[in-house]
Image: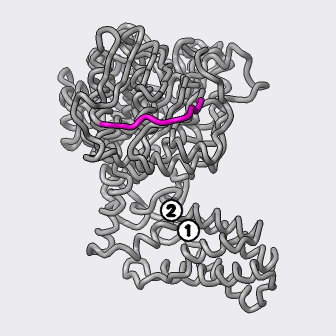
């Protein structure tokens, strides 16, 4: 199948990207002449017995296509657009080894899909949806041939319902977005200090006392797993051990390394509570609980966390210190390795493969309790941990650089390639790199605005993990991401509508035009800076300006592009476009008048500088002084936000006034 199509590994040209707003970009693309007019419904002909995945996917994507095209493209059933589907195997229980490759041909006589498995058909249907376009002839598909396969087998999204509760409907919604951009692992972080988020029928006191009533029932989990499977998405559960464990101890304080008490935790950070690894009751309880969870989750992997154990309770407990001395455990790394070894045996007994954050690998290979070779590592602290794991012949995935809660740009995530350089790994080591995950930690998001942090930037990460490494053109990525953002909203994501809801709350009424104009050039401060600017807890309302602002806002990106074009070429058309985007003034906004005033003065000074540049007339000293002052006034942060395009204004100042003036 893969040899049938022309190889086109080059990054898409701007025109090609505009015609085909595909993310991830396919491995092979060949455009043909002509088009296929679209008439709903899709009339599918499946060669052989259709699996449940394919039957559900044809109904789902057929509905999405009909909704996108609207009533004008709806015809009688006998006149629908023909789709011919062939696949060669049903994938069964999903694993990282499932073949997701497919070919897609669109011709004037119909649509033809060929895939190794039914999961490959799902990927082809997602691509088909992105191909639907509208022109003077109406809704149609361009004639083309695509051959596609993923670069990596693990393309995940972590969702954290512990810090802020994420109900079942929110999880199910994200599955549709993940399917569109071909992500295939949903990682559910189900226990942490702030909440125990899954029902245990064997040990009900865990969720009854540790969740404040907010948890997934086992039926919820079955629904999530089933709906994920229908979209070719695996569900990997995480139960964080031995640290991040406060919520466990509300039901079982006797298993902690200090007596407690352990009230519900509302703060964030690295907390002291940690399991007592010397207490045999710890392993008896974990055996019962993990055995129950192993039966509930069909995925071969079970994630045990293992991160950010500060060891303070272990250091302060004389019995634990005596145990370490007796068993020649030199430090807390060695003690946690002992704990991990006990967990490994429990999971092995229940048929699961252990996975954890890269701290679990912080033990020398020759140590008494060295990590077993088949434990997989999720690397978050840096790429060196990934390199170390791969060199050791251990399967690993990368999350460092893909923490979407840190509000960095899509370009930052896009250029964070997970594959180390040729000189850092041998061929054997490279084979152990499974892929990576975007992580949506929920300290500063809730179910209302979480989509504004996940989408559309996660589409850039999805492309990095699916598409060839040579597909790395940032402007092209942004052009396509704008279109994919609209596609995501059309199938149910709420990254645009959620912002409008928050803006109405901030404004106190429905008139949000001026506020939206301001927010469209603001972004939340990046990294962990919000925690440095204010004390946040699980009870902090997430209804402020920083919660409504989105990372990497599109309007700020357009302003940045135009400013840089003016600086480089002094083009009058770019200057005119900038004037359309800037200089209209900002209305008085009770919520943020200081920010609006700073922005208005900054844009006014910038337009003076633009006029000077395109006229090739030096900007007067007093104007330069005003511009410099406006930059200082706009530096922020403001209400935990900053202007996303401020660096471009600084470049404009330097071009008009000279550096250092």
* Relative image position of residue 358 (x, y in whole percent): 56, 29
* The residue stretch that appears in magenta: 30-39
Sequence-earlier tag: 1 or 2: 2
**Which residue lies under the disc numbered 1?**
643
Q: Is residue 362 above or below residue 139?
A: above
- Residues 645 and 67: in front is 67
- Residues 540 and 500: in front is 500
- Which residue is pictured at 30% across the width and 26% down the height? 58
Give the quadrant of the C terminus. Answer: bottom right
- Which residue is pictured at 78% across the width and 74% down the height? 655
Secondary structure of the residue carrying tag 1 is: strand
Q: On the picture, is 106 further left or further right than 604?
A: left
* Relative image position of residue 579 (x, y in whole percent): 59, 77
Query: Does any portion of residue 574 appear in the rendered image?
Result: yes
Label 1 to label 2: alpha-carbon separation:
6 Å
- Which residue is pictured at 42% across the width and 83% down the height? 587
- Which residue is pictured at 58% across the width and 16% down the height? 4
Q: Is residue 31 magenta?
A: yes
* Relative image position of residue 144 (x, y in whole percent): 53, 30
**Which residue lies under the disc numbered 2?**
523
* Relative image position of residue 80 (x, y in whole percent): 29, 31
Query: Does any portion of residue 171 appear in the rendered image?
Result: no
Asked if the residue at tag 2 contacts the one at tag 1, i.e. Cβ–Cβ closer than 8 Å, the answer is yes
């Amino acid at each position: 199948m893969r040899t049938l199509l022309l190889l086109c590994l080059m990054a898409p040209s701007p025109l090609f990207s505009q015609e085909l707003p595909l993310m991830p970009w396919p491995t092979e693309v060949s455009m043909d002449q002509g088009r296929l007019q679209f008439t709903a419904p899709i009339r599918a002909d499946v060669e052989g017995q259709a699996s449940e995945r394919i039957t559900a996917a044809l109904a789902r994507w057929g509905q999405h296509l009909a909704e996108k095209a609207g009533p004008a493209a709806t015809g009688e059933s006998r006149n629908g657009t023909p789709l011919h589907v062939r696949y060669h195997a049903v994938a069964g229980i999903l694993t990282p080894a499932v073949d997701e490759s497919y070919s897609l041909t669109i011709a004037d006589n119909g649509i033809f899909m060929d895939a190794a498995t039914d999961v490959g058909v799902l990927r082809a249907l997602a691509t088909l949806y992105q191909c639907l376009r509208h022109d003077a002839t109406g809704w149609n598909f361009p004639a083309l041939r695509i051959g596609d396969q993923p670069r990596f087998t693990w393309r995940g999204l972590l969702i954290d319902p512990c810090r802020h509760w994420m109900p079942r409907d929110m999880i199910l919604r994200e599955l549709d977005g993940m399917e569109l951009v071909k992500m295939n692992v949903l990682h559910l972080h189900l226990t942490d200090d702030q909440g125990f988020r899954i029902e245990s029928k064997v040990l009900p006191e865990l969720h009854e006392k540790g969740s404040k009533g907010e948890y997934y029932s086992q039926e919820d989990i079955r629904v999530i797993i089933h709906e994920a499977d229908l979209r070719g998405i695996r569900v990997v559960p995480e139960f964080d051990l031995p640290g991040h464990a406060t919520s466990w101890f509300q039901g079982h304080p006797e298993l902690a390394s200090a007596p407690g008490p352990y009230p519900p935790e509302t703060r964030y950070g690295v907390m002291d509570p940690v399991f007592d690894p010397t207490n045999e009751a710890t392993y008896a309880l974990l055996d019962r609980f993990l055995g129950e969870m192993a039966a509930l989750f069909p995925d071969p992997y079970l994630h045990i966390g293992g991160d950010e154990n500060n060891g303070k309770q272990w250091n302060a407990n004389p019995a634990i210190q005596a145990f370490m001395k007796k068993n020649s455990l030199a430090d807390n790394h060695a003690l946690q390795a002992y704990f991990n070894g006990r967990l490994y045996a429990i999971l092995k007994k229940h048929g699961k493969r252990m996975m954890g954050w890269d701290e679990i690998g912080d033990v020398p290979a020759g140590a008494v309790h060295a990590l077993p070779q088949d434990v997989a590592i999720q690397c978050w602290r840096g790429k060196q941990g990934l390199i170390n794991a791969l060199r050791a012949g251990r399967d690993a995935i990368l999350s460092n650089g893909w923490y979407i809660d840190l509000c960095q740009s899509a370009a930052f995530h896009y250029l964070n390639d997970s594959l180390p350089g040729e000189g850092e790994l041998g061929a054997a080591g490279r084979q152990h790199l499974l892929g990576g995950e975007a992580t949506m930690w929920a300290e500063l998001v809730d179910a209302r605005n979480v989509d504004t942090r996940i989408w559309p930037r996660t589409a850039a990460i999805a492309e990095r993990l699916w598409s060839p490494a040579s597909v790395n053109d940032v402007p092209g990525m942004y052009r396509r991401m704008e279109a994919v953002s609209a596609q995501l909203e059309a199938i149910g994501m709420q990254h645009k509508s959620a912002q409008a809801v928050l803006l109405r709350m901030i404004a106190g009424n429905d008139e949000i035009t001026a506020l939206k104009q301001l927010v469209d050039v603001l972004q939340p401060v990046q990294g962990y800076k919000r925690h440095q600017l204010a004390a946040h807890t699980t009870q902090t309302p997430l209804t402020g300006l920083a919660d409504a602002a989105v990372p990497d806002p599109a309007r700020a990106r357009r302003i940045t592009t135009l400013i840089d074009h003016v600086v480089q070429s002094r083009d009058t058309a770019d200057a005119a476009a900038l004037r359309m985007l800037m200089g209209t003034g900002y209305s008085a906004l009770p919520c943020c008048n200081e920010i609006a005033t700073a922005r208005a003065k900054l844009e006014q000074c910038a337009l003076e500088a633009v006029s000077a540049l395109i006229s090739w007339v030096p900007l007067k000293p007093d104007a330069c002084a005003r511009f410099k002052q406006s930059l200082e006034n706009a530096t922020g942060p403001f209400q935990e936000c900053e202007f996303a395009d401020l660096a471009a204004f600084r470049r404009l100042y330097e071009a008009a006034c000279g550096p250092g003036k």
